[in-house]
Amino acid sequence: MSENAHEPQTEKRLRMVERQIVARGVRDGDVIAALRSVPRHLFVPEDLHAESYADGALPIGQGQTISQPYIVALMTSLLQIDARSRVLEVGTGSGYQAAVLAEIVDHVTSVERVPELEERARLLLARLGYRNITTVIGDGSLGLPDEAPFDGIVVTAAAPEAPPPLLDQLAVGARLVVPLGPAGRDQILTVVRRTKEGFEQTRDVPCRFVPLLGEAAFTFGEKGRP
């Protein structure tokens, strides 16, 4: 980005990375560099710019939020991606997570079910010069089978279990990072890795996300509304 290093928002962002990301143990150099680069304040409503580098989630409209910076960094780090990776994001939201991913990987495809959010994110990402992000309006719980397999999939909404269509779209050795648990309560950030034999699941940290909706987003026996 072309911001001056001494601009107030740049200084806030660099402090955010040191105090909220590095201090909490994130060591992935690519992730740290991405968080330092992406102007988070541009991904929140203008009246929240002053809070954009605070340690928490913020509302972005349509009942959705931009995640806490630490959670964005952690989820990105858990994917274990690199410059050759093709990544699927489920839940574009503000576009911030997609921008962080795009600083690291070859290409990001991001699916959003709310057209207003997809349009806003698409226009902002284009204005910021990201050419390796494709946004799609659709049911993210189903993934994008025609584009699979992916080298990583990140789900920015919570489900009681990993949606089977997303698991099917992982390349061997790739990871799905998803919050698992009930809506409105603490969930657990979970990593599912595809192996030649099947899937390995590990649990990481407690978190709280809005619920994943869609045909394959089962809510304890009920399908989420499409």
Image (cartoon, grey):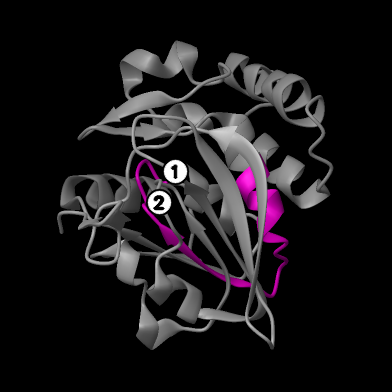
Q: Position of residue 61 (x, y in %)?
A: 24, 30
Image side of residue 139 versus residue 25, left or right: left
Residue lying at 41% horizontally and 50% vertically, measured from the top left: 125
**Label 1 environment density (alpha carbons within 10 Å; few <14, some 14–19, many ≥20):** many
At a point 56% along the width and 41% down the height, the residue shown is 188
Under circle 1, the secondary element is loop
Q: Residue at x 69, y 75 (%)?
A: 84
Mark identifier at residue 160: 2
Q: Secondary structure at mark 2?
A: loop
**Circle 2: is it few (<14), some (14-19), or many (20+) Cα within 10 Å?**
many
Q: Nearer the viewer, residue 30 or 3?
A: 30
In this picture, is 73 found above or below 8?
A: below
Between 146 and 187, the residue placed more toward the observer is: 187
- Image x and y of residue 102, in percent: 57, 58
Nearer to us in this view, 188 or 151: 188
Q: Amino acid at mark 1?
A: Gly
Q: Would you identify the image quadrant in which residue 85 lies? A: bottom right
Q: Residue furthest front?
A: 221
Q: CA distance from mark 2 to mark 1?
A: 5 Å
Disc 2 residue type (three-letter): Pro
Q: Is residue 2 visible?
A: no
Q: In this orientation, does residue 151 appear?
A: yes
Which percent across, then down, holds residue 137? Answer: 23, 63
Q: Which residues are magenta?
A: 74-95
User: Picture quarter containing residue 101?
Assistant: bottom right
* Badge 2 or badge 1: first in the primary sequence: 2
Quadrant where the image shows the N terminus: top right
- Residue found 61% across the figure and 47% down from its top: 75
Question: Horizontal and vertical percent for residue 185?
Answer: 41, 29
Measured along the vertical axis of the image, is residue 10 above or below residue 26? above
Residue of label 1: 181
Mark 2 vs 1: CB contact within 8 A: yes
